[in-house]
Image (spheres, helix red, strand yellow):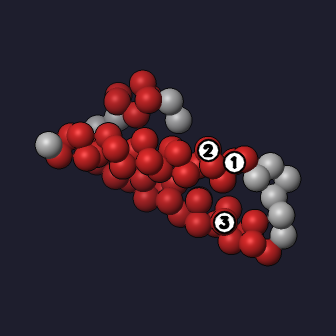
Amino acid sequence: MKQTEIKELSTAELQEKLGEIKKSYADLKMAHAISPLDNPIQLRAVRRTVARLATELTKREQ
């Protein structure tokens, strides 16, 4: 998810999206622990998306 897309979302949508992506990250991490993923780089991409969403929420709170 790009930063421009994140800025266009409302705060409620950001919180909802953050929950969804955190869940998908946990699922990916569990799947990778059981058997290696075809593309382990997607773990990094999802983790960075979580960070972008959390950062935008923090900016809006201030």
Q: CA distance from mark 2 to mark 1?
A: 5 Å
Image coords of residue 9 (percent x, y): 34, 35
**Helix, strand or loop status at disc 1:** helix
Residue assigned mark 3: 29
Task: Find out whether the residues at labels 2 and 3 contact each other: C-beta distance under 8 Å.
Answer: no
Viewer can see residue 43: yes
Tag 3 or tag 1, which sits nearer the N-term?
3
Would you call the spot at circle 3 few (<14 residues within 10 Å), some (14-19), or many (20 or more)? some
The part of the image, by quadrant, that contains residue 25 is bottom right
Instruction: Identify the residue at image location x=28%, y=45%.
Output: 57
> Measuring 50% from the left and 30% from the top, which residue is drawn there?
2
Mark 2, secondary structure of its residue: helix
Residue situated in front as seen by the camera: 40 or 27: 40
Residue, disc 2: 45
Q: Residue at 75% of width from left, 66% of height from top?
A: 32
Q: Which mark is residue 9?
A: none
Q: Residue furthest bottom?
A: 34
Tag of residue 42: 1
Residue furthest out toward the top = 4
Say above or below: 54 vs 56: below
Would you say 38 lies left or right of 8 here?
Answer: right
Tell me whether circle 2 and circle 1 mark residues in contact (CB < 8 Å).
Answer: yes
Res. 13 visible in picture: no
Query: Residue flagged by tag 2: what amino acid is it?
Result: Ala
